[in-house]
Amino acid sequence: MNIQGKTALITGASRGIGRAIALELAQQGIERLLLVARDRQRLAEVAQEIESKGVEVVSLAIDLTEPIAINIAIAQAWRDRGPIHILINCAGVAHQNTFLQSKPNQVHEEFSINVLGMYVMTRLVARRMATRGEGTIVNVSSLMGKVAAPTMATYSATKFAILGFTQALRSELAEYNIQVVALLPTLTDTDMARDLKLFRGVMPTTPEKVARALMTGLQQDNSEILVGWQSHLAIWCQRLAPWLLDKVMTSATPKLSTERSL
């Protein structure tokens, strides 16, 4: 995939995997980046870092739970900056809890940002891509979109939803020359992950490795990009010995407080 002269929009671009992908695209010579995140200050810091590499940057401080704001921002960006060739849906949140102690407001936030925010952004951009007859959409799922993890039930559910959404769009949008890709990183050392209790034996990868794996996968026209040997091992185990994977996941699951919350 040739990114020279292209414009990419990245959600969740102020930190973690989104930031690393933005920097990698800049390093690879993309012409323009539209960076989307809620944190205006952190977004400005990333934009300044990328601009120093000679790449044009447009910062869009948008809350993905506000469809009207997304619609206005995308319409203005497309009008003022030209077409978006690559959309990377990376924004996401995660809350860790046992299912019986899960909190509805946190579940709502996960689905609102991880799934519905991705849907709204994708719909707005994909319709324009379809009119032009070209484009690439990358939806960042997770290994947890293939292998559900205890204490991460609702987060896993959002990542499974992203994967199903991506698979359906891949077939639907192919006639418009739009490539739809799923990126599935293993646990990654980000601000979000540092707030979680890690599964025993799991070694986090880095956002930079995820970004490089994405670029390699796009160059090879992969429809699903698994990141990290642990991801490949888990998928292999799930297919050939699911009973063994269940035991491994149970033994590796961190112990959380079971105190009843009212």
Image (spheres, helix red, strand yellow):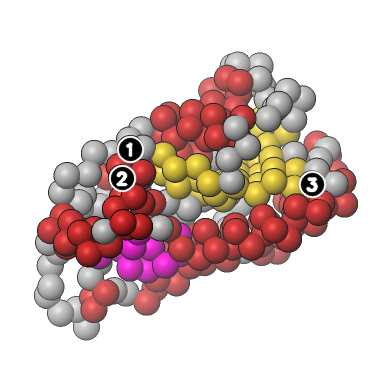
Disc 2 to disc 1, C-alpha distance: 6 Å
Residue at 37 percent across and 77 percent down: it is 104
Q: Between marks 2 and 3, how big is the CA–CA gap? A: 33 Å
Q: Position of residue 214 (x, y in %)?
A: 52, 35
Q: At which x and y percent is residue 198?
A: 21, 49
Tell me if mark 1 has few (under 14), some (14-19) or many (20+) residues whose alpha carbon lies within 10 angstroms of its own: few
For the N terminus, give its image quadrant.
top right
Q: Which mark is residue 229?
A: 1
Q: What element carries label 2?
A: helix
Task: Say whether residue 21 is magenta.
Answer: no
- Choose top left, top right, bottom left or bottom right for residue 134: top right
Q: Residue 70 carries which label?
A: none
Residue contact between numbered discs 2 and 1, judged by CB atoms under 8 Å: yes
Q: Can residue 43 be seen at all in this image of the molecule?
A: no
Please, is residue 153 above or below residue 3 in the view? below
Q: Contact, CB < 8 Å: mark 1 with mark 3?
A: no
User: Disc 3 marks which amino acid?
Assistant: Asn
Label 2 environment density (alpha carbons within 10 Å; few <14, some 14–19, many ≥20): few
**Label 1 vs label 3: CA separation?**
31 Å
- Residue type (three-letter) at the residue carrying disc 1: Trp
Q: Name the residue under label 3.
A: 177
In which quadrant of the rendered image does the C terminus lie?
bottom left
